[in-house]
Image (tube, rainbow, N blue to C red):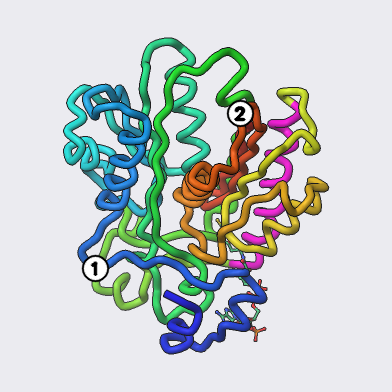
Amino acid sequence: MTNFDLEKIVDTSDEWITLRTGIKERRIAEEDIATSDLAYKAAVIALKEGGLSSDQIDYIIVATATPDMFFPSTACIVQDKLGAKNAGAFDLSAGCSGFIYSLVVGSQMIATGMYEHILVIGAETLSKFMDWTDRNTCVIFGDGAGAVLLGTVEEGKGLISSCMGSDGSGGDMLKLPAGGAKMPATTETLNKRLHYIKMEGREVFKYAVRYMSEAVENALEKCNLTSEDIDILIPHQANLRIIQSIGKRLKLKDDQIYINVDKYGNTSSASIIIALSELVDNGRLKENDIIAMTAFGAGYTWASAVLKW
Ligand code: COA
């Protein structure tokens, strides 16, 4: 869906969206496609590229803010579709920071020596929860999924540092108010359009820049690196201006930052793994490259990770 398509739906323009967000187009899942369908497709590709069969997976973690249902978990739906008969499965909900949270959790499960292969998936169909009459939100988000297979790597490689945080006092700034235990679905909640994503964009913007930058600084400090050591930063693709502000705060050069928000919009838990997947496909990652990732999202939550490739 391009910005021009959106011009026909709400009072907006390609110029406004491009200037304020850097987004030109986003992917929208078809009506009968749910988060688990995208997650499953990504998982199949990851398994194929990793040369593993589904019965070799020990755990499936699906990072998502837009699960198929409250329960069963989307991870269990994916487990069934894959026939991953030896795998435990659960969803991880940490807003747009969900992928990094899941990556850290999965990596630690392997680091303990208790598990061998963990499938971490970031998958979202945000379009299903979008108020297509609200120009403040519907121009920003998109659908997508990606998956990564975690396994043992040689000492000093893989995830070498991370930082995670939360501040629940910011919860009202980005939320899906109704449909949960606090506000169960009623005719009134439906009429008030409370089953859609609500966001105070300006507030979220300020905190996103601050916490995504600080999270990278913290994680770098923990592993005795500086921003100069970063070969590629993969920021959560929320908004081009947020990404540029982070780049400035961390004193990064343009070629140290990966950007694809123009093509996909904000795909929440899927954004970082989609970017990582593109970097792999484009042959852009070399052995021993230092990759930093950082994200911020609903909760508030934030997270960063430093990897040696
Ligand atoms: N098209 C045209 N005009 C729009 C618009 C749209 N899609 N959406 C909002 N506007 C208008 C507003 O109504 C406002 O008009 P007014 O000045 O007459 O009141 C004006 O544009 C400025 O709105 P504002 O909200 O201050 O714009 P902004 O520069 O903060 O940009 C966001 C809005 C949402 C793009 C920006 O705040 C943002 O990206 N925030 C972070 C969102 C995010 O990343 N969320 C997920 C985090 S994981």
Which segment is the magenta one?
A: 201-221
> Residue at position x 65%, y 67% from top?
202
Circle number at residue 6: none
Amino acid under disc 1: Glu
Sequence-wise first label, 1 or 2: 1
Q: Does dot 2 land on a helix, a strand or a loop?
A: loop
| Picture quadrant of residue 203 | bottom right
| Residue 265 visible, this angle | yes
Q: Which residue is mark 2?
A: 287
| Picture quadrant of residue 230 | top right
Q: CA distance from mark 1 to mark 2?
A: 41 Å
Residue 190 drawn at (x, y percent) = 29, 73
**Direction from residue 58 to residue 20 in the image, left or right:** right
Mark 1 crowd level (few <14, some 14–19, many ≥20, 10 Å Cα): few
Amino acid under disc 2: Glu
| Residue 95 visible, this angle | no
Say if 21 sits above or below 124 in the image: below
> Residue at position x 39%, y 77% from top?
132
> Residue at position x 65%, y 38% from top?
292
**In this view, which residue lies farthest toward the front?**
283
**Direction from residue 269 to residue 291 in the image, left or right:** right
Q: Does dot 1 land on a helix, a strand or a loop?
A: loop
Say if 100 sits above or below 2 in the image: above
**Direction from residue 174 to residue 118 in the image, left or right:** left
Q: Is residue 58 magenta?
A: no
Residue 53 drawn at (x, y percent) = 25, 27
Q: Which residue is mark 1?
A: 31
> Residue at position x 48%, y 67% from top?
198
Q: If the image is split into quadrants, where does the C terminus sit?
A: top right
